[in-house]
Amino acid sequence: MIRLETERLILRPWEDRDLDAFAAMNSDPEVMRYFPSVMDRDGTSAMMERARAKLSADGFCVFPVERKADGAFLGFVGLNRPSYDKPLPFDPCVEIGWRLARHAWGLGYATEAARAWLRFGFETLGLDEIVSFTAQDNFPSQKVMQRLGMVRDPADDFLHPMLGPDHPLAPHVLYRLART
Ligand SMILES: CC(C)(COP(=O)(O)OP(=O)(O)OC[C@H]1O[C@@H](n2cnc3c(N)ncnc32)[C@H](O)[C@@H]1OP(=O)(O)O)[C@@H](O)C(=O)NCCC(=O)NCCS
């Protein structure tokens, strides 16, 4: 069973006790600003179940981020094999992604957790490449990608296949990091 630790954080599989704080985060419009909509408690619960299923199938998924100091739920960070109904232009891939509650922004937690996941992905899973993508206007997320040393090639920019081409959030950027 995967359990990663950093200086300030514990990354471990989902537990039922995460649901309240996870649902509160997903209902915050500011957190969900670069997603088509906020997510209600049922949607959050379904997302947790999907993550658990991916952990069984793939051996990894996004994990909750727990602060060592007080056990607080800060959000999630992790690796994910995208499984949309429509393919991404760079499939197959493993992405790294993050979502933190607002109280946990600006403290370096996303980057700290992501570094542990990148090491796990390259060293333990033996992945050759990890990607990350986000809406073109989501600069906080792109700053995390840049801090991690991920690189964007504008030629990889794409329209998210699950959003209509005219949707304001459809234009996406892709960042890549190779094992080397
Ligand atoms: C994307 C998101 C996770 C970024 O969070 P974040 O807190 O800005 O990112 P980090 O954890 O890397 O923190 C870096 C910030 O903490 C600051 N910081 C403070 N203490 C720090 C420390 N000890 N170590 C490192 N950085 C620290 C850094 O200076 C930096 O601030 P800056 O961007 O103003 O320069 C957050 O904005 C979020 O959850 N957004 C909503 C969900 C979302 O859009 N997810 C991405 C979808 S693709």
Image (cartoon, helix red, strand yellow):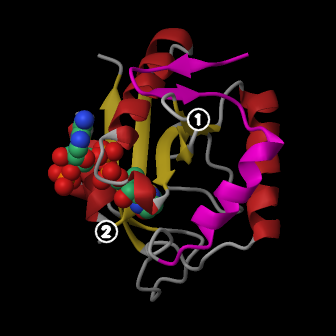
Q: Is residue 129 left or right of residue 77?
A: left
Identify the image quadrant of residue 39. Answer: bottom right
The structure residue drawn at horizontal position 66% and vertical position 29%, both measured from the top left corner, is: 60
Q: Nearer the viewer, mark 1 or mark 2?
A: 1
The quarter in which the N terminus is drawn is: top right
Q: CA distance from mark 1 to mark 2?
A: 33 Å
The quarter in which the C terminus is drawn is: top left
The structure residue drawn at horizontal position 47% and vertical position 68%, both measured from the top left corner, is: 31
Magenta span has 164? no
The structure residue drawn at horizontal position 37% and vertical position 27%, both measured from the top left corner, is: 115
Q: Give yes or no for contact between labels 1 and 2 (Cβ–Cβ under 8 Å).
A: no
Asked if residue 156 can be seen in this view, the reply is no
Q: Which residue is mark 1?
A: 71
What range of the chain is rendered magenta? 1-29
Q: Nearer the viewer, residue 77 or 149?
A: 77
Say what secondary structure mark 2 lies in.
loop
Number of marks drawn? 2
Q: Nearer the viewer, residue 121 or 20?
A: 20
Q: Amino acid at mark 2?
A: Gln
Q: Which residue is mark 2?
A: 136
Q: Position of residue 170 (x, y in %)?
A: 44, 76
Identify the image quadrant of residue 145. Answer: top left
